[in-house]
Image: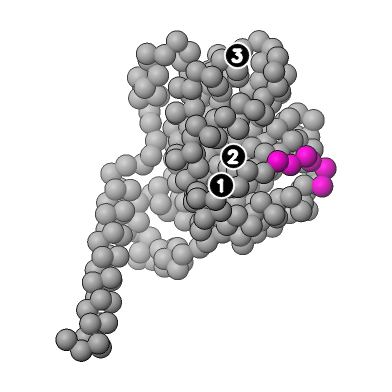
């Protein structure tokens, strides 16, 4: 076989492989929307001594669902904010961690448009997302120590919450967080599926994430002037091999957090997978951020 034919065959096989993988991803996304009903959540934690409860609140015509463990008097509150595509269930394993459960009240929230917070009605504006999550901050503002943990795109919203609540939020933990405008990867296919007729073929969950992705640079630019308003302590975890949300986000944040003390933990072998594959390490870091009371 000539080199030209060999190259052509390899290209064909690669293209077929990509299309098969794409078909599997799309099929999986049509079948699974990465969220759990209230009943499924109750069943998952039914055997635990400390069980979370599920609640909702309204902001105008928007519904936000969140999950919380019981208040621990005199101890901190930790609010987890997920990325995209995802839901509050992304942090379920932390709600099974007895060390964390005994040190803090844990809270997880479905961001607008995801999970059961009006699934399908994505809100690409970070400013508006923070407004919709503000009642959650108000609910726990009397906590002796309030921590917000933001993963990926949840980190962007967590940053805005910290800008809006100096003196209320005491600590922000950014995990693989997208913070700097343009410091993340956007695949060519993101632009393709934003147009008809391809949009009709894409599952709702992926469309939500894609719509947020394409608006994210401008959404981050909108909050850019307000980084100096953050006074909370900052902890950053990021994978050095993260090729979705680049590790340069850490340097960006350190440059703009001029009124905040920053600690960073760069994981040399990690990609955009810290919450899943380094959960124990992340939990240990989180425990170390909590005051000993």
**Crowding at mark 1 (Cα within 10 Å: few <14, some 14-19, many 20+):** some
User: Tags 1 and 2 in contact by the CB under 8 Å rule?
Assistant: no
Q: Which mark is residue 267?
A: 1
In this view, 140 is above or below 228? above
> What is the distance, in whole Å, between disc 3 and disc 1 at their CAs?
33 Å
84, 289: nearer the viewer: 289
192 with respect to 31 (left or right): right
Which mark sits nearer the N-terminus, 3 or 1?
Answer: 3
Nearer the camera: disc 3 or disc 1:
1
**Crowding at mark 2 (Cα within 10 Å: few <14, some 14-19, many 20+):** many
Q: Quadrant of the N terminus?
A: bottom left
The local secondary structure at tag 3 comes to: loop
Q: Is residue 133 in view from this perspective?
A: no
Residue 15 in picture, x, y percent from top left: 28, 71
In reply to whether residue 261 is colored magenta, the answer given is yes
Residue at 56% over, 15% down: 102
Residue at 55% over, 30% down: 283
The local secondary structure at tag 2 comes to: strand
Which mark sits nearer the N-terminus, 2 or 3?
Answer: 3
> What is the distance, in whole Å, between disc 2 and disc 3 at their CAs?
21 Å
In reply to whether residue 242 is colored magenta, the answer given is no
Q: Which mark is residue 71?
A: 3
Residue at 55% over, 35% down: 282
Pointer 2: what residue? 150
Part of the protein shown in magenta: 258-263
Determine the image quadrant of residue 144. top right
Q: Quadrant of the C terminus?
A: top right
The local secondary structure at tag 1 comes to: strand
Q: Is residue 168 in view from this perspective?
A: yes
């Amino acid at each position: 076989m000539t080199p030209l034919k060999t190259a052509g065959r390899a290209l064909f096989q690669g293209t077929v492989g990509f299309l098969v993988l794409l078909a599997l991803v799309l099929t999986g996304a049509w079948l699974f929307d990465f969220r759990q009903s209230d009943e499924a959540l109750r069943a998952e934690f039914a055997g635990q001594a400390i069980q979370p409860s599920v609640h909702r609140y309204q902001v105008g015509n928007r519904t936000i669902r969140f999950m919380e463990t019981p208040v621990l008097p005199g101890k901190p509150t930790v609010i987890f904010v997920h990325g995209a595509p995802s839901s509050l269930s992304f942090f379920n394993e932390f709600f099974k961690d007895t060390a964390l459960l005994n040190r803090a009240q844990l809270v997880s929230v479905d961001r607008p448009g995801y999970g059961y917070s009006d699934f399908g009605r994505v809100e690409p504006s970070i400013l508006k997302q923070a407004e919709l999550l503000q009642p959650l901050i108000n609910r726990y503002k009397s906590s002796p120590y309030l921590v917000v943990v933001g993963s990926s795109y949840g980190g962007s919203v967590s940053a805005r919450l910290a800008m809006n609540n100096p003196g209320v939020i005491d600590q922000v933990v950014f995990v693989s967080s997208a913070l700097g405008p343009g410091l993340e990867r956007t695949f060519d296919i993101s632009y393709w599926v934003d147009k008809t007729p391809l949009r009709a073929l894409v599952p709702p969950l992926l469309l939500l994430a894609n719509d947020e992705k394409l608006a994210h640079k401008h959404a981050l630019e909108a909050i850019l002037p307000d980084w100096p308003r953050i006074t909370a302590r900052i902890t950053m975890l990021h994978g050095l091999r993260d090729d979705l949300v680049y590790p340069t986000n850490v340097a960006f944040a350190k440059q703009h957090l001029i009124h905040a003390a920053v600690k960073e933990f760069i994981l040399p072998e990690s990609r955009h997978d810290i919450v899943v594959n380094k959960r124990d390490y992340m939990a240990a870091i989180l425990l170390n951020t909590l005051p000993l009371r």
